[in-house]
Structure formats: C-alpha cells, structure tokens
Image (cartoon, rainbow, N blue to C red):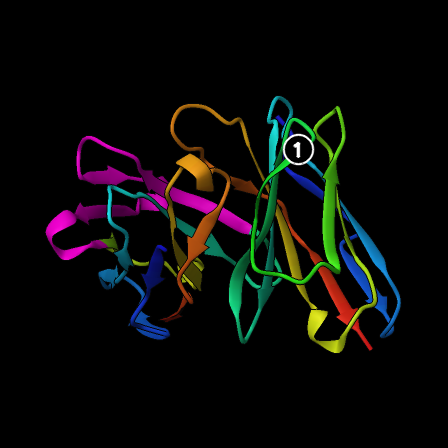
Amino acid sequence: KAGVTQTPRYLIKTRGQQVTLSCSPISGHRSVSWYQQTPGQGLQFLFEYFSETQRNKGNFPGRFSGRQFSNSRSEMNVSTLELGDSALYLCASSVPSGATDTQYFGPGTRLTVL
Amino acid sequence: AQSVTQPDIHITVSEGASLELRCNYSYGATPYLFWYVQSPGQGLQLLLKYFSGDTLVQGIKGFEAEFKRSQSSFNLRKPSVHWSDAAEYFCAVGTGGTSYGKLTFGQGTILTVHP
C-alpha cells in the first residue's frame, strides 16, 4: 500500500505571497492532520480534517487554512507569507478507528520564504 | 492540556551499546503514546505505540518502550545500537476524544552513533 504523499517536496516563495500544499493519504485513511516543524518551535499541530470537516485546530493565525476533498486528499494554504513560515510541513493520515488513531506521516514539504 | 518532555536534546552512544531515550508526559488520564524517528530531510516513521494493555511494547528495528504510569514516563530502549539508528527521535502523546487527530510532540532527541 502506498504511503502518504505530499507535493511539492520543496517550495521557495517570497514574503506576501500565498502557497498551497497538497497531501494524499494512505488509501482507506479518512483523517488527515497537518503539522509545522521548525528548529525553534519543534513539531506543532496545525489542524485535522475528517470527512471534509475540520475537527481540530491548533494555535495558528487565520492565514493558515486547509480543506479536505471527498477522496480524503487534503490541501493547506498559507496566505500573506512571512519569513517565520519557513518550515517543514508534514501531513499525516489515519483510519481512524476506536478511541484514537495511529498517524502515518508523509515526507513533508520544505517551504522557504525569502 | 497535555505536554511531553524529552529531557535529553542530544545523546551520543557507541555502536553496539545499549540505548535509553527518556520521555515524560503530562496528562490527567491515560494517554496514547508514540515514538517516531526522523532521518534528516525525511518525514516521521512510527517506531511503536502504546494504547492500553501490556506496558512493555515492542516496535520495529528492535526498539521497545515501557509505559510507567507512576512516573508518567514512556522511555524508549534498544539493547544494541546500530550506526543506522542515528536520527532524531520524537515522543508524542495523543488524547483522543475532542482532540482526535492531534498529537503533541516532545522537542526531540538527536542520537549520534560512534563507530
């Protein structure tokens, strides 16, 4: 079974621009979570989608948004990019089942903001 | 709110030596606990998880972890480290319920393996 795929793998943008990142979950997985990883703040939860609905959201400004499509693929969008948005953005998918779920991560998208 | 602490930022061991990476969590109820490993420039790979039951869990690549409720710990161990184990290791906690789909991570421990 193919793993979680993220596109693009690398992206360079300038301040003020917007960017869209894509995530395709493992086949059969319906939950997609997004995380931001930076050297200073570590891994931080952005949001989680299930059945095209955002169920949980982390503590990030409204410039960060996402959506999920009927095939469970997800996109996240960052508008008005800032230098501090440079990070590795990781997507994870899960079934989900039971009281919690096991999340499987993609390789990430490395975003550099100049 | 839950939190995770990995007290060791960087650990160096010799190849063949044993390894223990520490993880402490803060959460009022029984948490769901995970260890992930990340190689440079890569995503996170799941090593093992604890949901309930036996407090000693086995994972991939010869790793194991033990859940100790009294100490709020979930330490990762390996009896003999290989050079390929050099990477960054993250402990994470999930709480389910209204926080379904959210993992809280520790700051990570970088493992260096000397030949």
Q: Which residue is mark 1?
A: A53
Q: Is residue B92 above or below residue A27?
A: below
How many circles with numbers are drawn on the protein?
1
Q: Quadrant of the C terminus of chain B?
A: bottom left
Given the image, on which type of amino acid does mark 1 rest? Thr
Q: Residue at x 87, y 71 (%)?
A: A16
Q: Is residue A19 above or below residue A22?
A: below
Q: Residue at x 43, y 63 (%)?
A: B86
Residue B31 horizontal/vertical position (percent): 29, 43
Residue lying furthest left: B70
Secondary element under disc 1, as helix, strand or loop, is strand
Residue B75 horizontal/vertical position (percent): 24, 55
Instruction: Tell me if B47 is positioned left or right of A36 in this view.
Output: left
Q: Residue at x 74, y 24 (%)?
A: A71
Q: Quadrant of the N terminus of chain B?
A: bottom left
Residue A24 horizontal/vertical position (percent): 71, 36
Q: Residue at x 80, y 69 (%)?
A: A81
Q: Is residue B113 above or below residue B50?
A: below
User: Does the image show residue A74?
Assistant: no
Q: Nearer the viewer, residue B83 or B110?
A: B110
Q: Chain of mark 1?
A: A
Q: Is residue B15 above or below residue A7?
A: below
Instruction: Tell me if A21 is positioned left or right of A47 in this view.
Output: right
Locate residue B13: give its quadrant: bottom left
Instruction: Tell me if A101 is positioned left or right of B52 in this view.
Output: right
Residue A50 horizontal/vertical position (percent): 61, 31
Q: Which residues are magenta?
A: B44-73
Q: Nearer the viewer, residue A46 or A3?
A: A46
